[in-house]
Image (cartoon, rainbow, N blue to C red):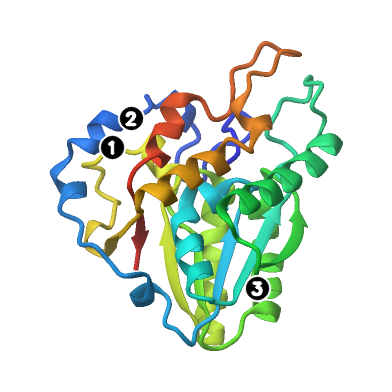
Amino acid sequence: MATLTEETPTAENPDMTDHPATDEVRWRDDPQLAKVPQVHPETLVSPDSRAVIVAPHPDDEVLGCAGLLMHLARSGHEILLIAVSDGERSHSSESALSSDLLSHVRPAETSEALRALGIANITIMRAQLPDSRVGEHQRKLQDLLGAYLQRGDTVFASWHRDGHPDHEAVGLASRDAARAIGCRLIEIPIWMWHWRTPEHHEIPWQRARKLALDPDMQARKKAALECYRSQLEPDHSTGNAAILPPEVLAHFHRDFEIYFV
């Protein structure tokens, strides 16, 4: 996840940052979310299919699908993680955490987080597209995905209406590449939980499926999220708040994950 600033408006709503955040209690009490049907991991990814995770920024793969990754690892699935950007622009240009430093720190945090999840058998490909500008390189990303995807893969990407321009560009590029190659695409809402409300007309509730996380998986996911220290801690050099404050993390401490199939 990367922060939204006035410099990175969403494709659909340049004033998204002025929209009030949605409290987790509102999602928890929503009847639509409560009645989302559960799905078995092998229904999402068949035993003979490779799973390809397309993450806009370091941390999105854990925020969105840590539980899925653990299920896949336990069943011996082949997993490819395509890290679209290094998340180097998560902090302001005045921060002591420079873009150059973050381009090393944030991928290292992902490696640490994957170890916390117990994910050892995973291939990581870093595309190193510019953070906050993935939309400018959407065709390049689509071509890159086309070179790495194989017919029969199951592709997981951020929802193409997720409310962050990088997430939306990743969703669109993944959709087009998957369609061209012959892959199944499953979308993951991430920013949606923060900016949308349960009654928002664009949320495809009919496509939503709920993947259960057992207590051990919940604990491992929480430990993995704690590895992203650059995103969890306030920026003392600028006085800016953490990118992932507790009210945001609350959306990802659930005993389930949601996928749009």
Query: Whole-percent x and y of residue 220?
Result: 50, 46
Query: Which residue corresponds to mark 3?
Result: 145
Q: Secondary structure at mark 2?
A: loop
Foreground pick, 149 / 214:
214
Q: Quadrant of the N terminus?
A: top right
Q: Which corner quadrant of the image does residue 210 belong to? A: bottom left
Q: Earlier in the sequence, mark 3 or mark 2?
A: 2
Q: Is residue 232 above or below residue 12?
A: above
Q: Give the total of numbered labels.
A: 3
Query: Whole-percent x and y of residue 241?
Result: 59, 18
Q: Which residue appears at 30% of the width and 51% of the height? A: 202
- How far is the residue under mark 3 from the one under mark 2? 33 Å
Classify mark 3: residues with Cα within 10 Å, few (<14), some (14-19) or many (20+).
many
- How far is the residue under mark 2 from the one under mark 1? 6 Å
Foreground pick, 28 / 194:
28
Query: Whole-percent x and y of residue 149?
Result: 62, 80
Amino acid on which disc 3 is placed = Leu
Q: Which residue appears at 55% of the width and 79% of the height? A: 50
Q: Which residue appears at 39% of the width and 32% of the height? A: 250
Query: Which residue corresponds to mark 2?
Result: 22
Q: Which residue appears at 70% of the width and 80% of the height? A: 147
Q: Quadrant of the C terminus?
A: bottom left
- How far is the residue under mark 3 from the one under mark 1? 31 Å
Foreground pick, 21 / 23:
23
Amino acid on which disc 1 is placed = Thr
Amino acid on which disc 2 is placed = Thr
Q: Secondary structure at mark 1?
A: loop
Residue 197, numbered label: 1
Answer whether labels 2 and 1 touch (C-beta < 8 Å).
Answer: yes
Q: Secondary structure at mark 3?
A: helix
Q: Earlier in the sequence, mark 2 or mark 1?
A: 2
Q: Is residue 226 above or below residue 237?
A: below
